[in-house]
Amino acid sequence: MSRGKKNNELGNGEGGTDILSITDGHNKRDSCEVGADLKEIKSTLNEVMGVLKQFSGGMRNMQGEITKLTKKCNQMDNSIHRMHNQYDNVNREVTRLTKNCNGIGMCMQREILEITRLKKQCKGMEKLIQKANDKIITSAECQMVLLKNQKWEYSAPRPSDFAHMDDDGEEAEVFLEQIEDYTEKMRYGTGDGDIYIRADIGYDAEFLPHWKEFAMALLQYRHCLKCTQGEESSFRLSNVELPDNVIDLLSDALKTTHFRKFVLQDNEFESSKGIDFALEYLQRNRILKDFTLYDNPIHNMKYIKRLCRIISKHPSIKTFGLTGIHIEHQGIDTYKMLCSIMKAGQTKLVTIDLSENDIETGRDMIYATQFWSLLISVAIYLMMMMQLQLQGH
């Protein structure tokens, strides 16, 4: 039997109607459920579509914001680029200004150096002008003194005879001739700046007026020495006794009369006033180059120390002599004296004469070694000074 027939039979049978009804009922129920599901799906789709629309709107808004931000970033990038350009321009300007400032600084430095040079030159010119003015004034003073002395005459009386001087009569004549000659040369300005009295003679009261004339001429002679700047000038008294009253006259006369060379030899000082006079002259005379004491006793180490202090501060002393001063009888440590003088004159003195002083180091080998070391040092020092002088020339 075919399937169609079977179905017709079932449908035409007793239970056929119920089966169809049931089937229709299920179908209806299924259709309702499917419709509800479809509605729910549709509603969900609508919600999804709404969400997608919102998302799409948000995306569009975000795209708009991104576009705006992109524009802003581009603008900021352009601004940064412009700022870099401005920074480069500023940097170049700063570099240019720095170079200009450096150039100005160098110019100012050159100007300052030029101003300093001109100031030094002006000071040098001022000194030259001052020296010229001083020389003019001194020359005028010298001329006035010389004019005034045209009427001056040597007035110290000559002793009537020298019988009371025993064998010193001839030396007295020599001495008086010398002191009168130098007095007149100083008064009339005819000398060459060299005063050298040498006579083996003791002091006599009849010599005092001659010493007074000599001292007054010395006092005035400072003007002539200033005119010639005291070049190669010298003051030397040799074998002439100088008592305290004569020392006082010479001390007052030589306070402002400055020679380049000063020598006192065998003057038989009555007291320490003679050494005081010599040291004071060394200290006052700032242009003195040569100072010598010969055969004039120094009484103690105090004078040696004082002498060393003066030498260490003296601006122009070059030659120093301290010979035959009889220190062996004065309790002076000769080695210590030598060390002190060398130390004081180590950067000043070119020539040092300490001969005839019996300088000894004793038998102690230590002192002997020190002494020879000192002599070697002296030799090296003198060689260095000679080398410096040769380099200066």
Image (tube, rainbow, N blue to C red):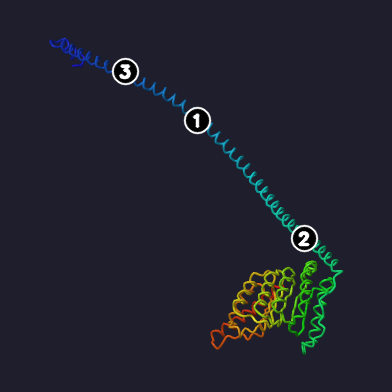
Q: Mark 3 touching mark 1, by CB under 8 A?
A: no
C-alpha separation, residue under disc 3 versus residue under disc 1: 39 Å
The tag earlier along the polypeptide, 3 or 1, is 3
* Residue topped by disc 1: 70
State which quadrant residue 261 falls in: bottom right
* Residue topped by disc 2: 128
Q: Which mark is residue 236?
A: none
Dot 3 lies on which element?
Answer: helix
* Residue topped by disc 3: 43
Q: Position of residue 145 (x, y in %)?
A: 82, 66
Above or below, 378 against 167 in this view is: above
State which quadrant residue 372 falls in: bottom right
Task: Inspect the image, locate mark 2, and give the three-letter code of the amino acid beneath it.
Answer: Leu
Task: Inspect the image, locate mark 3, and give the three-letter code of the amino acid beneath it.
Answer: Ser
The tag earlier along the polypeptide, 3 or 2, is 3
Q: Nearer the viewer, mark 3 or mark 1?
A: 1
- Which quadrant is home to the N terminus? top left
Q: Nearer the viewer, residue 83 or 330?
A: 330
Q: Position of residue 263 (x, y in %)?
A: 72, 78
C-alpha separation, residue under disc 3 versus residue under disc 2: 121 Å
Above or below, 291 against 171 in this view is: above
Q: Is residue 269 left or right of residue 54?
A: right
Q: Nearer the viewer, residue 148 or 164?
A: 164
